[in-house]
Amino acid sequence: MRRKIIPLMLMLAAGLMVWQCSPKEDPAEVQTGGEPETLLEPITASQIDSVVKQYRGEKAVLVNLWATWCGPCVEEFPHIVELQEKYEDQLKVIFISGDFTDPYVEVPKFLKEYKVDWTTYLKTGNDQEFIPAVDPTWSGALPFTKIYDKQGNVVARWENSADFETFHKHVKNAINGG
Amino acid sequence: MKSAIIERFGSGVLTLLLIWGASILPVQAQMNQVKPISIGTDAPMTDVDLETTDGEMTTLQASAMEKGLVVMFTCNTCPYVKAWEDRFNEVSQMAKEQGIGFIALNPNTKYRDKGDSMDDMKKRAQDYNYQFTYALDKNNQLADAYGATRTPEIFLFNSDMKLVYHGAIDDNYKSKADVQKTYLKDALMALGNGNDIMPKTTKSLGCSIKRVR
């Protein structure tokens, strides 16, 4: 009897340890009705192209490089979210964060505040490779925006923040074919 | 040929053709694009008076040493600056040992009331024991002349005050211990020893300069 109880207790203890060590709630995920969608995924220089290309022929794409602590990024963030909601079927916004202090806590918290419920990305890897992979004309200053039409042509790109009208004008242009 | 077409169809047709041609080409909007000075360019505005955190006035020319000058655009309000800040004194010391001056400029005119005032700069220099000159770039005029876009951003000039290196301090802002490429230190050593600098330009993420235009 004692021989059976000891292994059982060990198994229970191991199970308890696994349960204690596993995250209670993943802050980077949100339940969207079906499968949970990851709010923040790492992205490297070599992955940027394929992430952008997956919407080719279907939607215009707006890529925005930002960070939670970046004042101009935070100023323009709601404009971009508003446009994603307005043109849900014709535009895909790809946010890439440059956060590096507790990004998997800070970024999802910010995204939830602004009701962003789609997958966004976290810049990962060397700046020297990453910056030209986003755009060869980008200096690395945040924020940076690049807009593609449905065929994948770049219709606009700029450093620094912009107002809603500017974003809207270029998004409409991209949706209408560049 | 052109005159024959104009003669036959009139200039209106040509105009229409030009408009149609422009409309089918993808037009790229490129706003607010600041262009940095190129390698080999003379340092601009070297005689402009700059107020320092020591309460004195200086110029870039006065800050240069016999082998050149490092101009670092920086500020008090950027996490990238803070992440790299544990290397500032080290690189400035190394520059001086190579006979190269070192000056840091704060160009964030729009943030003078948000942490980038002269008083804030004085406190920063004191808190972090800056061993180099920290000066205010009034109305971001030097940042505009150099085409600087972010903080921190380095421009290294040789003894003729021609640009020989532009870009990052190194390849890892997050961790000094994990740096693999010491771009600025390598450039300083090369310049000090009279060798060619490679690479001459590098890129890094940074906070956009808060300019007034």
Image: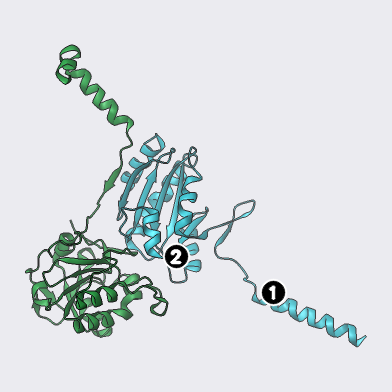
Chain colours: A cyan, B green
Q: Is residue B120 left or right of residue A121?
A: left
Q: Which three-letter amino acid code belongs to the residue tagged 2?
A: Gly
Is B111 situated above or below B58? above
Of labels 2 and 1, earlier in sequence is 1
Q: Nearer the viewer, residue B74 or B42?
A: B42
Q: Which three-letter amino acid code belongs to the residue tagged 1?
A: Trp
Query: Dot 1: what SS?
Result: helix
Question: Mark 2 — residue?
Answer: A125
The quarter of the rendered structure image containing the N terminus of chain A is bottom right
Q: Residue furthest bottom?
A: A2
* Chain ID at mark 1: A
Same chain check for tags 2 and 1: yes
x and y percent of residue A45 in the render? Answer: 44, 58
Question: Mark 1 — residue?
Answer: A19
Identify the residue shown where x is 18% and y is 12%. Answer: B8
Identify the residue shown where x is 6% and y is 69%. Answer: B47
